[in-house]
Amino acid sequence: MQVKNKWGEFLLEQQRDVYLSMRVRIALRKAGVIPMEDKKKEEECIAKEKRAVKSSKKNLGKYAVSEEDVIKAFSDGDEVGHPLPSSGIIGFMDSSSGLISSG
């Protein structure tokens, strides 16, 4: 469980666009804003929220996301893994099992 918590913590702290996109999608899903049938409109919604987060001094947009939300999104298969190169954790999320593996 500690590895999952580290993954959630890592994702919340990172400023890279890929991680920001993940956080925004997780937050918008949690709020029931996405998924949308119109994928173009969905992408516009995600981009708008990303801009809001980037322009916020506290790195927060309209929708909040917690470490638990991040863990749930990966465990449920809503998000799929990426390597964690700078976190000290080298691992990935296996969306079929919902587990984070090292290596």
Image: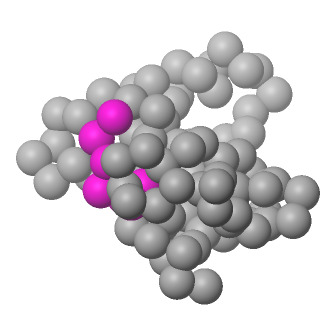
Visible in this render: residue 52? no
Please tell me which residue is depicted at 27% across the width and 52% down the height of the picture: 60
Q: Is residue 93 left or right of residue 86?
A: right
Q: Quadrant of the N terminus?
A: bottom right
For residue 78: magenta? no
Q: Which of the 4 image quadrants contains residue 34?
A: top right
**In the image as oriented, which residue stretches furthest toward the left?**
57
x, y percent for residue 42: 63, 26
x, y percent for residue 75: 74, 66
Image mark count: 0
**In the image as oriented, which residue stretches furthest toward the front?**
103
Up-down relation of residue 41 to residue 68 (above or below): above
Please tell me which residue is depicted at 69% across the width and 63% down the height of the picture: 101
Magenta-highlighted residues = 10-16
Q: Nearer the viewer, residue 72 or 84?
A: 84
Up-down relation of residue 32 to residue 17 (above or below): below
Up-down relation of residue 56 to residue 38 (above or below): below
Q: Quadrant of the C terminus?
A: bottom right
x, y percent for residue 87: 37, 56
